[in-house]
Image (cartoon, rainbow, N blue to C red):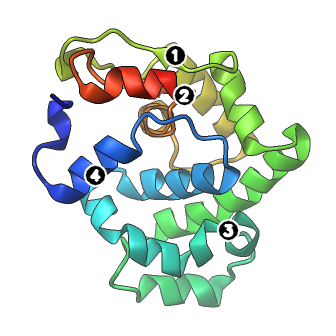
Amino acid sequence: MRCSWCGDNPLYVKYHDEEWGVPVYDDRIHFEFLVLESAQAGLSWLTVLKKRENYRKAYEDFDPKIVAEFDQEKIEELMENEGIIRNRKKIEASVNNARVFMEIQREFGSFSSYIWSFVGGKQLVSCNESIEELPAKTPQSEALAKDMKKRGFKFLGPVILYSHMQATGLVNDHIISCFRYKEVSESK
């Protein structure tokens, strides 16, 4: 059995089975999810997953150093790219966020070190029996959102950041009957 939220869409199932909840320590992957999750605001995650490869190309394989250098001309180019979500505020936020992301890397040695500090350096494991029990945000995601906002991040509130924590394995929110629940906890 798997978590019911992924339904039977092959892309969603693959994401659930291979990525969601697996602990991430790679800064590039964290940046990728921050870009995608901020783009997702107000849309379904499946919509974003369908555009992920287009984002990968448009965002230079999610290299924050390159994205931080995007100028107005590049932003206009992205606004014309039908393969991504063409929302100017979200695109501009992603460039801003790349710059702040790199400031955090300089301060903490890595973005991973920074974000994992909000869960005490180890994965939080939930014991939910159904997806209805999953929270939209937690005290940890609220603290993270507050700190990130103070540092200058945009389009990343406590709900989006809780999604980030779930996606990148800071928390294991697979329901306990899901075959990935134990596997993800053991992959730490």
The residue shown at (51%, 69%) is 91
Q: Which one is earlier in the sequence, the residue at label 2 or at label 1?
A: 1
Which quadrant would residue 102 be assigned to in this image?
A: bottom right
Residue 177 visible to an observer of this rendering: yes
64 and 143: which one is in front?
64
32 and 74: which one is in front?
32
Q: Which labelled disc corresponds to residue 170?
A: 2
How far apart are labels 3 and 4 at the CA level?
A: 24 Å
Q: Which one is earlier in the sequence, the residue at label 1 or at label 3?
A: 3
Placement of 183 over or under 42, stated as above or below: above
Which quadrant of the rendered structure holds the C terminus? Answer: top right
Indicate the secondary structure of the residue bearing disc 3.
Answer: loop
- Which three-letter amino acid code belongs to the residue tagged 1? Leu
User: Residue 134's spot in the image, x, y percent?
Assistant: 29, 19
- Which three-letter amino acid code belongs to the residue tagged 2? Leu
Indicate the secondary structure of the residue bearing disc 2.
Answer: loop
- Circle 4 is placed at which residue position? 14
- Circle 3 is placed at which residue position? 63
Q: Which labelled disc corresponds to residue 36?
A: none
- Which three-letter amino acid code belongs to the residue tagged 3? Asp
Contact check, label 1 and label 3, Cβ < 8 Å: no
Placement of 81 over or under 129, stated as above or below: below
- Circle 1 is placed at which residue position? 124
Contact check, label 2 and label 1, Cβ < 8 Å: yes
How far apart are labels 1 and 3 at the CA level?
A: 28 Å
